[in-house]
Image (cartoon, rainbow, N blue to C red):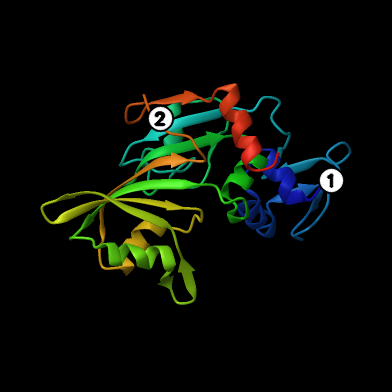
């Protein structure tokens, strides 16, 4: 098994971030610091440490669905002492958010210590659906939305696309529903800004088929067995 996968299974981070941890020299395998990506370990024989702590995959996985409020960081901890989504749960287990929502973005957020599921749900290869509702500045036309469907550049050489629909108009702003499969940083905000309609307020209403129906802002619940099974099916586990 590759070392980054083992770190992910132990809930350290998704594989991409686990690679960073390895390169930083924070991982020891059998008394030897390992910085090489692609390094393979045998979990039955090798002892793997992170920052001096022996790593073992969790015996019991947890899956938490949260209606994330605005003003909370999607992180395990924050160096500026701002409230995090993990603070809201207050769990003893070390849980990690799957993907990120900006500080001022609300809505569906999944947290788990299941590293492999987290990795796959975050990887564009599996085309996990993410649906947002955004109040944006100005009167959005159907022609502007077609640009999102065809593909819009949010950075030089970086083109993203998504399905979009106008839900409502009010005074000088428009409520737009946007569905994407990628998970680029601040993607929805960058897409809407690129077509001349900056986001005023953003909420994720669906992630991998999950919604927060019945959950007030800041509330959370554990996933049901059927919901977990469906997530596994979506990503081929």
Q: Eyeballing the image, is 220 above or below 107?
A: above
Residue 164 is situated, as x and y percent measured from the top left of the image, at 36, 55
Number of numbered labels in the structure image = 2
The answer to which of marks 2 and 1 sits earlier in the sequence is 1
In the structure shown, which secondary structural element does the residue marked by tag 2 occupy? helix
The residue carrying pointer 2 sits among few (fewer than 14), some (14 to 19) or many (20 or more) residues within 10 Å by Cα, namely: some
Residue 145 is situated, as x and y percent measured from the top left of the image, at 32, 62
Observer able to see residue 11: no
Residue 40 is situated, as x and y percent measured from the top left of the image, at 83, 52
Q: Eyeballing the image, is 161 above or below 130?
A: below
* Residue annotated with mark 1: 30
Q: Residue furthest bottom?
A: 156
Q: Nearer the viewer, residue 103 or 87?
A: 103
The residue at 43%/40% (across/down) is: 206
Horizontally, residue 145 falls left or right of residue 136, namely right
* Residue annotated with mark 2: 88
Residue contact between numbered discs 2 and 1, judged by CB atoms under 8 Å? no
Quarter of the picture containing the C terminus is: top right
**Label annotation for residue 216:** none
Horizontally, residue 147 falls left or right of residue 160, namely left
Horizontally, residue 7 falls left or right of residue 159, namely right
The residue at 63%/46% (across/down) is: 120
The residue carrying pointer 1 sits among few (fewer than 14), some (14 to 19) or many (20 or more) residues within 10 Å by Cα, namely: few
Observer able to see residue 37: yes
In the structure shown, which secondary structural element does the residue marked by tag 1 occupy? loop
The quadrant holding residue 203 is top left
Residue 91 is situated, as x and y percent measured from the top left of the image, at 51, 25
Q: Residue furthest front?
A: 142
Q: Marks 2 and 1: which is nearer the front?
A: 2
Q: Nearer the viewer, residue 42 or 66?
A: 66
Q: Nearer the viewer, residue 93 or 16?
A: 16
């Amino acid at each position: 098994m590759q070392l980054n996968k083992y770190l992910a299974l132990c809930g350290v981070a998704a594989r991409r971030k686990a690679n960073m941890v390895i390169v930083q020299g924070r991982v020891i395998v059998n008394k030897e610091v390992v910085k090489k990506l692609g390094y393979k370990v045998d979990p039955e024989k090798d002892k793997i440490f992170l920052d001096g702590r022996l790593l073992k995959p969790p015996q019991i996985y947890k899956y938490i669905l949260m209606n994330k409020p605005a003003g909370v960081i999607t992180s395990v901890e924050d160096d500026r002492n701002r409230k995090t989504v993990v603070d809201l749960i207050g769990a003893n287990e070390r849980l990690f958010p799957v993907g990120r929502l900006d500080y001022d973005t609300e809505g569906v957020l999944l947290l788990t210590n299941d590293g492999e599921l987290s990795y796959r749900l975050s990887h564009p290869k599996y085309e996990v659906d993410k649906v947002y509702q955004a109040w944006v500045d100005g009167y959005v036309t159907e022609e502007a939305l077609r640009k999102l469907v065809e593909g819009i550049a949010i950075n030089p050489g970086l083109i993203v696309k998504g399905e979009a629909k106008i839900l409502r108009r009010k005074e000088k702003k428009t409520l737009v529903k946007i569905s994407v499969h990628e998970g680029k940083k601040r993607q929805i905000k960058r897409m809407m800004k690129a077509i001349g309609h900056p986001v005023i307020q953003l909420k994720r209403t669906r992630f991998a088929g999950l919604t927060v129906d019945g959950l007030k802002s800041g509330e959370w619940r554990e996933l049901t067995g059927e919901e977990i099974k469906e997530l596994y099916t979506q990503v081929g586990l």
